[in-house]
Image (tube, helix red, strand yellow):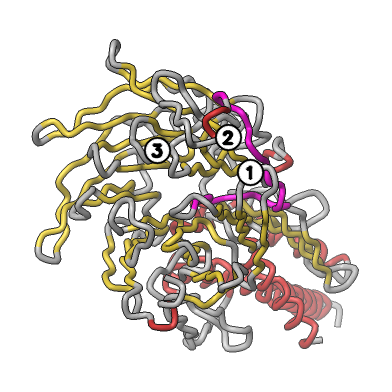
Amino acid sequence: MAAVAVHQFAPCITCHAWSPDHSMIALCPNNNEVHIYRSSQDKWERVHVLQKHDQIVSGIDWSPRSNRIVTASHDRNSYVWNREGPEWVPTLVILRLNRAALCVQWSPRENKFAVGSGAKTVCICYYEQDNNWWVSKLIRKRHDSSVTSVAWHPNNILLATTSTDGKCRVFSTFIKGVDTRDSKAGSSSDSKFGEQIIQLDLSFSWAFGVKWSPSGNTLAYVGHNSMIYFVDDVGPSPLAQNVAFRDLPLRDVLFVSEKMVIGVGFDCNPMVFGADERGIWSFVRFLGERKSSFSGSKYGSQFSEAFGKFYGQSKTGVSNDGIDPSRSRGGIHENCINCIVSLGEEGSSRTLRFSTSGLDGRVVIWALENQEDLSEYL
Amino acid sequence: MASTLRLYLTCIRNTLEAALCLQNFPCQEVERHNKPEVELKTSPELLLNPILICRNESEKCLIETSINSLRISLKVKQADELENILTKKFLRFLSMRAEAFQVLRRKPIQGYDISFLITNYHCEEMQKQKLIDFIVQFMEDIDKEISELKMSVNTRGRLVATEFLKQFI
């Protein structure tokens, strides 16, 4: 079985992030707080509650080397939390946003972070030592709709974004004074801040969940039309592949190696995509087992009784023998999975463990060590 | 007759399974607000194509989806004047008590008899399969209920007329 551990933390989880040693998890239980849990002998206890936001926290990222947490929320704010003794202390971030912040991610060198927002802009924030706060530079006028996901290239300069206008764009985020010009990096260092490197118009529906492969050579993102897009050689002449699958759309992806991608979404089951020797991507299989069960209890009585039984019916589930019983998606997660985080060592090119969290309030840890049929892709 | 109902309901069920992929999405127009985009309709890129499923001329179902909400409007079969009145009164009774149903809309869309509004919050609290079961069950029961009401009206009318006319015998 690929799922190693299942924990129920809350009725619903928006997003989660792991501490550098993977002993603590920070998650948002679908409200304005961030709860940090520590694992001790197979039990989880809540050690901290970070309360500063006014609305739901939409993104959390925990930097592995500098041990800082950045949170972004629908109330247009973002905070960077530093560990000072037993407490987490927030530092103000001047985002200059006038709509909700939707996603946040630390850059590989952890000197910057990117925030995607509903204001159709992306904010790149860096630390200003003199005033002890984080200031932002905005990438404006490029997106036609909300920015749903951001991902940093390993070179710390390129940033890929996806938006609800269906396009994926790659920008250069070179900031003078923060980034150093690398003489051998070539074209990416020559661009100025906010310059759009490419724009990918492959999806005719909303785009979510963009990620770079560990080497930075391949880009993957999903569209709401049940397709996943792989782009090689991101540059003046990219090579794009579309993979369509039969099931419900995905929400997020993760590269576990150069040739394997895990996608999670409305099917409540992680999907494995692999590339063969020629570099052609395809759907391999589902990771979890698929249960198909139907509740056979009789739905008796009058409609007026059902009127009163609405609560009971919708939560426990009754089905009439006459109509086709609903196919329960079953499996480990019971509701949509919306976040997937790698649990591997930082900087390595392949990860064997990752965790998923979903709207059912569960965090599931998956391990790929025992999956023999997938070892060729790792 | 029963077979077309089966097909109609299966089609609606499959469409709902695909359409009920909703997520929390804050409003792009107003800061700090979260509104059902299918009702607002200000950002066309956030709306998906509406689907109209017709069983015959008098029965149809309109499903409109957006990124965080879904609206289902039903038109129920009304064969004659009496059924017309009964449907209107019965569905109005239900719509007035929309709070108890949570997913019901207080006013039906123009041209339809009853409408449901399902948002991402409903999908978080309740299971998607159960929501779909509820909608399909509702559709099946509406027909049964209206015929039962019509029969009871006719029966009562007959009884009252018999009693009244007895005095003239």
- Disc 2: CA contacts within 10 A as few (<14), some (14-19) or many (>=20): few
Q: Nearer the viewer, residue B49 or A370?
A: A370
In this picture, residue B168 sits left or right of residue A94: right
Q: Distance from label 3 to label 1 (Cα)?
A: 20 Å
Q: Earlier in the sequence, mark 3 or mark 1?
A: 3
Q: Secondary structure at mark 2?
A: helix
Tell me the residue that label 3 is attached to. Answer: A107
Q: Quadrant of the C terminus of chain A?
A: bottom left
Frontmost of labels 2 and 3 is 2
Residue A187, disc? 2
Q: Chain of mark 1?
A: A
Q: Nearer the viewer, residue B72 or A265?
A: A265
Span colored in magenta? A192-212
Query: Please, what is the three-letter code of the amino acid marked with disc 3?
Result: Ser
In the rendered image, is residue B153 in sight?
yes
Q: Earlier in the sequence, mark 2 or mark 3?
A: 3
- Disc 1: CA contacts within 10 A as few (<14), some (14-19) or many (>=20): some
Residues under numbered marks 2 and 3 in contact, where contact means CB atoms less than 8 Å apart? no
Residue A235, disc? 1
